[in-house]
Structures are given as structure tokens and as C-alpha cells.
Amino acid sequence: MNRQCTDSSEWRLFPDRRYYRLVKSFCVKVEKKEWNACPDCYSVGNRVPLIRVFDLKNKCAIRINNSFFSTGKSADVPQDIAEDLATKMDNGTIYTGWIGASDPSHNTIRIDIYERLLLPCTGLTSISWSSGGFMSPSASVTISTRNRAFHYSVDDIIKSMADPTVLDISFRFSPEPWNTFVLPAFHKCNFMAWADGDRYCDPFVFDGQQWQMTIRQGRKIAKNISGSNDYPEEWGIFMRFVSACLELYKPEGDYDDFYGSMLRYPLDIECSVFRERHNMTRKKLAGMLGVRAKDVSEWENGTSKPDGLTLMKLYERIDMSTRYDVHAVFDGEDDEDEIGTQTDKTDIRQFFDQNWMITHISHDKRE
């Protein structure tokens, strides 16, 4: 990522050809009052996340992140372009929008769509990641390929005043889960495409999550990466991977407070809530994951846990259902307020049932 800072308050982001490939370009008209309200949002080089939309009328809909636009219709990717990208996007290909040009006199911006290139992750010896914020505990993860070791720790200064307990988990993967779970996850995380010696910074957020990562190949540091409220496109995949590792290997005890920044809910709760939300039986969920209904029952009862790959598949379905942007279309109009009716809920459930194998995760930069 070529990132240039023209002054202390403005960051300009330009895609690096080593990590991105230009696919399509199109123009978007912005209302004059909106442009005047937030001109910095339309600066050339700003990254614009693309969101795959479940639209009951247009099943290939892709939308530009609405934080940049007041009206959803002005932020839609043109249908002919969306049709070319939607299938690949649903299968996991990551696309990112960039503001390639802007014309304030005509209230027009050009969006350049880039495909995120997947680079081979070879010779990796260790990954060290840490994060923290003013209102959140500091956490760190270290994964070593030399001895298949995983270490996770959390230090909450505020809680430590009353209870000096610091969460510290270390274990080693056995060869089978390492080869079938960890190494494929590294490939999905696409670490080699993360910006080297750079800083992912969102200048519009002044207080939040600060993080840094060191990636080593052999004895040398391959990448030193840091960020402040902005993240690489694969950030959600990395968080899901760490979350799965912790869910699989965490020791007995009540550590829910410490896991808040990583795990959404304990697996037994999240799995059952996921089924209830979509009116799904254990048998149906088991069929999607390639396991038995008895296995799903044991997960929800807390008597067993899925293997690493199955857990990742489960998280992908949960993420897909909760983080896709869903829009119902009635009488040719996009009216989100009507989603609350029983008929609309049924239509949306049927639409999701027909598209369950979609595993793409949307990558919002404020994720």
C-alpha cells in the first residue's frame, strides 16, 4: 500500500500493484450538500469498502460503504459491474474500492475497484500481534511455526487493580490440526499482502484500537505493520482464526470478560442463537458443516467441540448471516422499514436458505 501523508491531518492512500489488481472503474454522482458537508471523504486515494448486499430483487447487488454516502441508491455499484464481481465475491475474493479521481465542480467521483491479490505465505517462522486501546485491555498473540506453539495473553489494567489475574494461555498444536487448520488459515489471512513498514490509520477516529504486528521469515523480520482504527482487508479472517484457536484450546474457567475483544459469545451460546435466528434445525446445520446432528447437539451442550476446520466453517456462516447488508425490495422500492413485517421476514429467510453456501466475509475498514 502506498500511503502518503501530505500534512499531519490528512492521509492519502494509494493501492500498491504488488497487492492489488485494477478490475473496473465507474463514476458516482454525489449531492452538492453532502459533498460540502464532508469534502475529506471524497479525497483522491481514500479507500471505500465494498459490501455484498442481499437484495431480494437484485441478487448481484454490491454497495459502497454508506458512511461515505447519504443515499443508498447513489452508492450502488452499477449492475453490469456487480454481476461480474458478485459470484467471485461470494466465493471469497476480496474487492476494495478506491477514489481514483474527484471533480468538486460537478460533484462527481470515480471509484476504482481493485482485486486483492492472494500471495503465497512461505518460509513463515512466527507471527506476533498485539493490540490495545484507551478503553480496552491489551492483548497479544504469538504463533511460532518452528514448534507449532500458540501463546495468547490479556492484561486489563483496570481489572488488575481489584484482581491481579492476567489471562495467559500457551499450547502446541499437534501435527494434524497444524497442517489441516493452521497452515490453510495462514494462507487465507494473506499476511504477505499486508502493508510492510506502513501504518493503517483512520484519521477520522481519534481514540480507539491501536495494534501492531511483526511477521518473520527465517531469522529475518519480513514485515513490521501497525495500525490505528484501520485494518487490512483480511483482518476479519485473522480475528476469526485466533477466535477459533482460543475456542478450541481455552482452559476451564470463567474468562468471558477477558475474551470479549476476541470471542463474541461462548460457542454453545453462539451456535444455538445462530440456529434460532434462522429457524434452523440441528440436522440442517450439521448438513451444511458435514457433521452429524449429534455433534451439533454436543457443541450446544458443552460436552464437545468441533475440530478447527469445522469451527472455521461455522464462524463463516455466522459472519455471513450477521455482517452482510440485507435489503428487501417491495413494489420496486428499497424500503428497509418494512423488513419488520412477518411476510418480509419469511422472504428474507427463504433467500438466505437458498444462499447458505456463500462464505464471503465483508471487510469494513472499521471492523
Image (cartoon, helix red, strand yellow):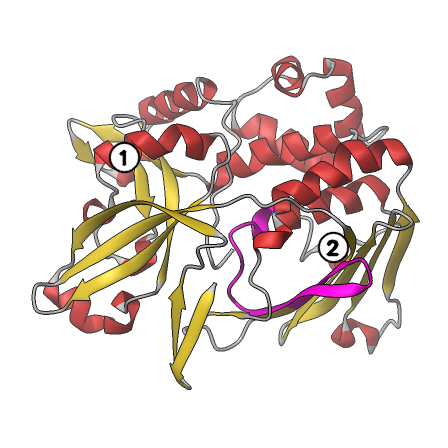
Residue 54 in sight here = no
Say if the magenta span includes residue 139.
no
Q: Residue visible at 28% across and 73% down? A: 40
Residue bearing the label numbered 1: 338
Image coordinates of residue 179 in percent, x first then y, are: 81, 34
Q: Does 185 sit above or below residue 128?
A: above
Left or right of 306 on screen, residue 49: left
Distance between the Cα atoms at labels 2 and 1? 36 Å
Q: Residue furthest left?
A: 106
Q: Nearer the viewer, residue 328 or 16?
A: 16
Q: Residue visible at 68% across and 53% down? A: 262
Q: Amino acid at mark 2?
A: Tyr
Residue 151 lies in what quarter of the image? bottom right
The local crowd at label 2, few if under 14, some if 14 to 19, many if 20 or more residues have their Cα within 10 Å, is: some
Which sits earlier in the primary sequence, circle 2 or circle 1? 2
Q: Which residues are magenta?
A: 212-237
Q: Does 145 sit above or below residue 278?
A: below
Residue 249's mark?
Answer: none
Q: Secondary structure at mark 2?
A: helix
Q: Residue visible at 61% across and 33% down? A: 273
Residue 259's mark?
Answer: 2
Q: Residue furthest bottom?
A: 8
Q: Amino acid at mark 1?
A: Glu
Say if the magenta span includes residue 232.
yes
Residue 354 lies in what quarter of the image? top left
Image coordinates of residue 215 in percent, x first then y, are: 72, 60
Left or right of 147 on screen, residue 271: left
